[in-house]
Image: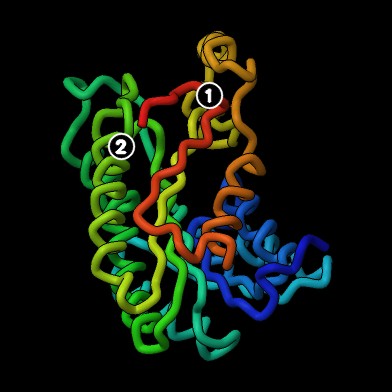
Amino acid sequence: MGSQRLAGKIALVTGSAQGIGRAIVTRLADEGAAVAIADIQTEAAERTAADLRALGAKAIAVKLDVTKFDDAEAAAARVERELGPIDILVNNAGWDKLEPFIESMPETWDKIIDINYRGTLNCCRAIAPRMKARGSGKIVSISSDAGRVGSTGEAVYAGCKAAIIGFSKTLARELARYQINVNVVCPGPTDTALLRDAMAGREGVLESMARGIPFRRLGKPEDLAGAVAFFASADADYATGQVLSISGGLTMAG
């Protein structure tokens, strides 16, 4: 097990059945948190929860469609019934479709906006009032370097991720008086099944992307997990409204 700096804490991580979310929830559990794997993919979430329990962690799977506010409310209530008050919310659920904006259609925009941006709003609105009532909490939202610097073929996605940054900075100001920290982690290109699927048939592009990164490799889900664990811990008690890029040095602008 890890440092146990999250011992006694309860975390809900959206979209955590696989990929970056699974790495995050695994790291939080390793550091002592009881975790809720909140995902629309219920079977995969159950497998992740079972894997974590096998390692000695306290973990449950919770069905959550982040695009529905009622789902977010119900998931929060269930986690509090089964595990206790939520100390840590990680907004990780996301989805994208790579295509030039002038070839995209409104139904695709709606899906990207609903999952990436509205999903974050729904979960924050469902859980932040509970944190306010207790006078403590950590909210960490996964944005993207696409939201900081733009990314070809990801116009609407980049817009949503930029919106998460602006929303989080404002929420950080509003909630600081209640001792709630709100911070953002921005991954660069990360080697996940989602990225591999999106780039199917264009593996040469992935190799080119890796060459453009100072560390000469794509990110790994585990590279993001440590940054989230930091923001979720007491080590970050005086950090709020911050945006941390984990991109292997690909982007270095402030």
**Rendered residue at 25%/54% (across/down):** 167
Q: Name the spot of residue 222 as percent of width and height, x first.
A: 66, 43
Q: Which mark is residue 249?
A: 1
Nearer to the camera, 26 or 186: 186
Name above or below for residue 90 compared with residue 198: below
Q: Which mark is residue 227?
A: none
Q: Residues within 10 Å of mark 2 (few under 14, many from 20)?
A: many
Among the two numbered marks 2 and 1 on one chain, the one whose residue lies closer to the N terminus: 2
**Colour option used:** rainbow
Nearer to the camera, 185 or 136: 136
Q: Name the spot of residue 105 as percent of width and height, x first.
A: 18, 32
Nearer the viewer's eye, disc 2 or disc 1? Answer: 1
Q: Residues within 10 Å of mark 1 (few under 14, many from 20)?
A: some
Q: Name the spot of residue 201 as percent of width and height, x first.
A: 53, 15
Name above or below for residue 187 compared with residue 6: above
**Residue 204, located in which quarter of the rendered image?**
top right
Name above or below for residue 181 compared with residue 146: below
Q: Residue furthest front?
A: 238
Three-letter amino acid code of the residue under disc 2: Tyr
Three-letter amino acid code of the residue under disc 1: Gly
Q: Which residue is mark 2?
A: 157
Q: Name the spot of residue 235 as percent of width and height, x first.
A: 58, 61
Q: CA distance from mark 2 to mark 1?
A: 21 Å
**Rendered residue at 65%/50% (across/down):** 23
**Rendered residue at 53%/21% (across/down):** 200
**Rendered residue at 51%/70% (across/down):** 88
